[in-house]
Image (tube, rainbow, N blue to C red):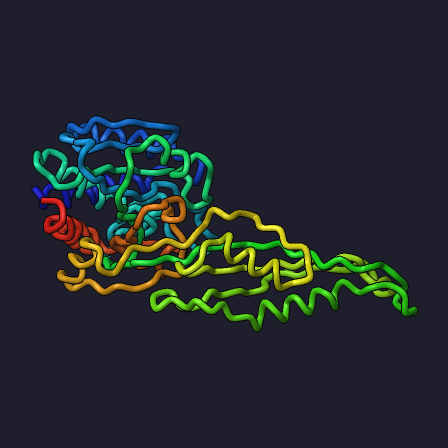
Amino acid sequence: MISVLKNEAIELLKKLIEIQSYSGEEDKTAFLIEHYLKSQGVETKRRNNNIWAVNKYFNESKPTILLNSHHDTVKPNKGYTKDPFEAKIIDGKLYGLGSNDAGGSLVSLMALFIYYYHYKNLKYNLIILASAEEENSGKSGIRSMIPLLPEIDFAIIGEPTLMHLAIAEKGLLVLDCYAHGISGHAAHTLGENSIYKAMNAIQWFKDFKFPKISDILGEVKMTVTQINAGSQHNVIPETCHFVADVRVNEKYSNKEVLKIIEENVDVEVKERSLRHNSSSIPKNHPIVLSGQNLGRKTYGSPTMSDQTALTCPSLKLGPGDSLRSHTADEYIYVDEIKEGIELYVDLLSSVIV
């Protein structure tokens, strides 16, 4: 059965690659995913462009595992030398937009779900969710689905990790900071220069160290990435705007980090969003121990995924390499998908069977 599922997964991925599915425009890939699952005898549900299903013998009294990956893509960059919507296998590499991020993970998780779909006495229920709008963190993606799904005990999020165990993922906090001064003529001593005020705050962002350091994700990292002030050379600017990019480890919530920042800088701070929190799963969780028994390494991931929408423990794991994501001539090795499906099946076997 696994051999058949491997071949079907690769063929499905080829079809997905050849359908444009930018974030918010995934209706055709959603239809394809829905059609494929139904062809396997799976009863599916759909909301917007999100497709989901539960295993055949779902039991509300049992704990539940969410298997999730996304079927939207970013737009291809200008560096492509191959047609991003033509699925080609060359020297063992399957090329095409979304092949690595995260088509390979999605079709592999779907194969995993189908493999266990008809099992009667699983220790856990399974949910498969092929979600939309991951790349733009859209409101019609996974966040719109959480209220509809049964309670989730832990999740496996399919993203390219070379099938190693990303047991923690940094959160993101983007801050618009405004230093307010008093406008005046540059030749006089009147006025208060907002740039100088901003400089003090920027120095704090540069030097401050959050005391809680993660052994997986390291420190909270703050970087000032943009700055803008002034309109002409002889006018003291009354406002200086700068942007801070803050990557949060699992020791803090975004709200906690924001509060510490606000208490320490003499500028107005406006957060763009508090929802992209860090996520993690305990090192001694059964799914992590199962992966380690299979020779998989644990690490902390610097990139974000749909894990930010979840409050349950979650593990990021999938075939492919994160370094290939969003690159020109994106690809995934066919063997990575085949090996990924085997590892997914073996990973769960000691936990749910």
What residue is rendered at 23% in x and 42% in y?
Answer: 65
Number of disc labels:
0
Answer whether residue 217 is visible to the viewer in this image.
Answer: yes
Relative horizontal placement of residue 65, taking residue 142 as reference (left or right): left
Q: Nearer the viewer, residue 343 or 267?
A: 267
- Residue 90 is situated, as x and y percent measured from the top left of the image, at 25, 55
Viewer-nearest residue: 345 or 265: 265
> In the displayed structure, does residue 142 sit left or right of residue 200?
left
Q: Residue at x 59, y 64 (%)?
A: 224
Q: Is residue 13 visible?
A: no
Q: Quadrant of residue 219?
A: bottom left
179, above or below 157, in the image: below
> Where, quadrant-wise, is the C terminus in this rendering?
top left
Would residue 313 appear left or right of 327 to someone viewing this image?
Answer: left
- Spot occupied by residue 315 in the image (x, y as percentages of width and height): 28, 53
Residue 161, located in which quarter of the rendered image?
A: bottom left
Asked if 206 appears above or below 178 in the picture, the reply is below
Q: Quadrant of the N terminus?
A: top left
> Can you name the residue that lies furthest to the bottom here?
207
In this rendered view, identify the residue nearer to me: 339 or 251. 251
| Left or right of residue 145, residue 13 in this image | left
